[in-house]
Image (tube, rainbow, N blue to C red):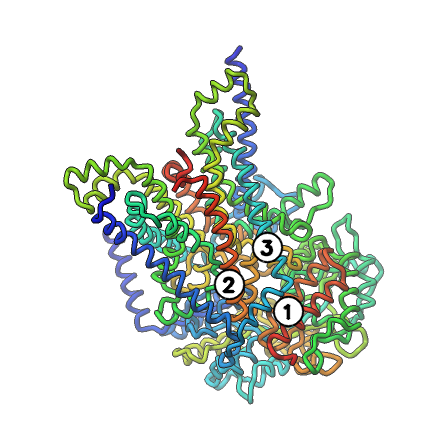
Amino acid sequence: MKRALSLIGAAVAAFLGSSAQAETLSIATVNNGDMIRMQKLSEHFTKAHPDITLNWVTLEENVLRQRVTTDIAAKGGQYDILTIGTYEVPIWTKQKWLMPLTKLGANYDVEDLLPSIRSGLTTDGTLYAAPFYGESSMVMYRKDLFEKAGLTMPEAPTWAFVSDAARKLTDKKAEVYGICLRGKAGWGENMAFLSAMANSFGASWFDMQWKPQFNTDPWKQTLTTYLGLMKDAGPPGASSNGFNENLALFQSGKCAMWIDATVAASFVSNPAQSKVADKVGYALAPDTGLGKRSNWLWAWNLAIPASSKKGDAAQAFISWATSKDYLDLVAKEEGWANVPPGTRSSLYANPEYRKTAPFADLTLKSIQAADPQHPTVQPVPYTGVQFVAIPEFQGIGTAVGQAFSAALAGQTTADQALQTAQTLATREMTKAGYIK
Amino acid sequence: MATAHSRAAARLTMSPAVILLLGWMLIPLVMTLYFSFLRYNLLMPGTEEFIGTMNYQYFLTDPAFFAALGNTLALVGGVLVLTIAGGIGLALLLDQPFWGRGIVRLLVIAPFFVMPTVSALVWKNMLMNPVNGLFAAIAKGLGLQPFDFLAEAPLSSIIMIVTWQWLPFATLILLTALQSLDRERLEAAEMDGAGAVDRFIHIILPHLARAMTVVTLIQTIFLLSVFAEILVTTNGGPGTATTNITYLVYAQSLLQFDVGGGSAGGIVAVVLANIVAVFLMRMIGRNLDI
Amino acid sequence: MARAATNRHKLVVTLIAWTVGIVIFFPILWTALTSFKTEAEAVATPPTFLAFHWTLENYSEVQQRSDYFLHFWNSVVISVGSTLLGLLVAVPAAWSMAFVPGKRTRDVLMWMLSTKMLPPVGVLIPIYLLFRDFGLLDSRVGLVIVLTLINLPIIVWMLFTYFREIPGEILEASRMDGAGLRDEILFVLLPMAVPGIASTLLLNIILAWNEAFWTLNLSASQSAPLTAFIASYSSPEGLFYAKLSAASTMAVAPILVLGWFSQKQLVRGLTFGAVK
């Protein structure tokens, strides 16, 4: 007993001793599957860098965003590595809050990063955040149900086809719903989907004078199409469904179609999680023939606060976590299907990946089809496909999301919701000084 | 009885608590008041400027503000009524002799120990979820259409969750009060032919009045700032159906990072809370002879 | 005859009370049960009650992902620390309010309670800036201070109501014997006040354990208590009900067990002067 105690004591002393000289990195990240895997695999990194210890702060997306934003804006300095989205990167770069990533190493191969993803993270030719995984959105559908109904999904469907098919495939008694779409309010939840959908209908958030556009016909068409579709062919409780809820629905076989993030493809096709793994087909997000499809573009990226004193160690970690070698490591440990997708061209050229990921092609096509610099049919003063890259957007986007979510819950009509959205967006934009 | 000496000692012993709370209240309050007159967005440092009362104008004319005011009152009032009524019922029940009283008591007080975030997560995902939740499974088992609680009756659902959390507290206080009731008075009333209802209205209820006031006071303090339950379940929606004042201030300051607007909202919330406080204190003053 | 009637009455009450008790407890029970299911079984229709394949895999996965014991220990330190610190400040204050009431005692007490009505979100940014400047971000000391201040009004109020029930004559008697103020508090008042202090202590540990706004916003990795631990399980991708249940059970169990075991002590002083 005594010996055991002294052993523990020695171990503690050794631990304290080694951690005293080591550099400790605090990493704030989202609790998504790919990040949790990164945390699990990070021992490979610490083995190669024995002088660096990692402290993980894993939080749910909204909590994480609130925490890291408060911290970086108030210069709290609690984190050395931040996980942030493509929305934050340009805004934070402009504030000089992020450290330029110039020490990622000789064989990092920046050129290999997908151009549409990389452009959003680069300012004046310098990378300020490294993409960990990237995504667009696409249609995931049940091949068995389509076959049974005698329907064929084209590779690039229109909204007319999707609406029609959704209604035909709905069998509420059997708990099969034609289409599952996001309804939970939030700028990154229902508004991510609806903004991208609106783009395909020719709508936009603002015109060149920053006037909100919710009183225009394209928005009205967007919202009435969405509400009608969800009423006839959507699952119950859709107004509180976000990505996770819909994923659970689709995996348990309750949706015939689901339009959402391309990363979901690897979850719905994984037999360990999904009851319908072998029955899933993929298609591009629908359009209306106006030249823009309703798919978004998003990436979760790793970045370093400009004030961090551990920049070198932090860049070493980021370089490891977003490198080609990391992709190989995940492939070796957990299989190609679990590799974080959507960041590197080389992954999509890899025959082994293409073999295990039938969705690889469509994912790449979807990512390439999104153009954050020119997201809409009409010209707009902003960048960002499913968001508007201005600091005020989170608040406005979420409030508009609430109004649309209320319409989905049946509390208001489409017209009332659009009216509310228009009023509140105008108020906020006037207050912030965009509208003079 | 109190001598000058003991008075001075009293002031001395009280001062740490008073000074600490004064600091805790005043320092942030002054800073908040100052911020509330600025254009101050955390995401745009360097653009701060004095803008007078504009933040207040925007906050007070926000359509969401009135909704939030109503929701706050409904939430506080609803939970108070339900916990007090339910608490009295439970106290009367637990006061009776029956087998396994100790264990039932443990079961009844359990929700009080559950952290708000956890109870909101559990209710939302495992019970109220219209597809995978237990209530939906029961409804389907009975051949009914599952009810989508958080979409169709959002505020009532939140009231239900919060009531579940606070029912044990009310029950405990009311039960302790009930147990201090003089049994002989009840028996005497029964001898005189007073029915159960009469006894309840004329003897038990008045006896519980003080306990009910205490429950009201303590719970109001906590209910005014209900937040985690809303954030986890509905995010204040759909629309503004479940946005209370606290949540509205949160949306301003931590979603929009509009510190100016959020501060104005915070000051408004403080004023409102003080109105409630004055009202409550009057009520307590009458019922509790402090 | 009378006895049979009483027994029948008792049986009916027993049935009703147990039903009510189980209904109230059910959400917790259901969570605990689900934490032992596989993810697939957690969403099975119809739901399985006990006849499922019991597994501990959720617990091991949760432990693998986050250091439960670090969070647990932080929760213990923060809740106990803030309660003890709070008592240290509150006992003298409550003592003087109860035994040497002045004209303004009532106002002071009410004012203290009203500080609890300030919405915490409104003052987060100022506090965050102050914490940054004092280097208190992500430190247990910082969280102990904040939670002490938050719960201080409740502590003072609870102690005050309890102290007031202690007859003043005892103090006068001790004063006659020449006891000083310190002796008066230490040897006369405290022993009589132990039940009240014990239940104040317990109630505050519970409140501090469950406080989720400040603890989440002012901590990062080092000082994060269980409330932050839960925030990393609230909506991960894919099926998550079983893992969420396991994490919830782990976060709630310690305080629930403490509450159950100390139930008698907790209730004894939990009257806030409501019992006369």
Q: Are marks 2 and 3 in contact (CB under 8 Å)?
A: no
Residue located at (25% from left, 54% from top): B12
Task: Say which amino acid is labelled 1.
Answer: Gly
* Residue A297, placed above or below residue C16: below
Disc sitting over residue B258 in the figure: none
| Residue A86 seen in render | no
**Percent coordinates x, y for residue A397 in the rendering:** 64, 69
* Residue A176, placed above or below residue A302: above
Residues packed near mark 1 inside 10 Å, few (<14), some (14 to 19) or many (20 plus): many
Q: Which residue is mark 2?
A: B266
Looking at the image, tell me whether mark 2 or mark 3 is earlier in sequence order. 3
Say yes or no: labels 1 and 3 on the same chain: no
Q: Left or right of A316: which side holds B247?
A: right
**Percent coordinates x, y for residue C170 in the rendering:** 24, 35
Q: Which residue is mark 1?
A: A397
**Percent coordinates x, y for residue B116 in the rendering:** 50, 51
> Mark 1 falls on what kind of element?
helix
Residues packed near mark 2 inside 10 Å, few (<14), some (14 to 19) or many (20 plus): many
Q: Which residue is mark 3?
A: B233
> Mark 2 falls on what kind of element?
helix
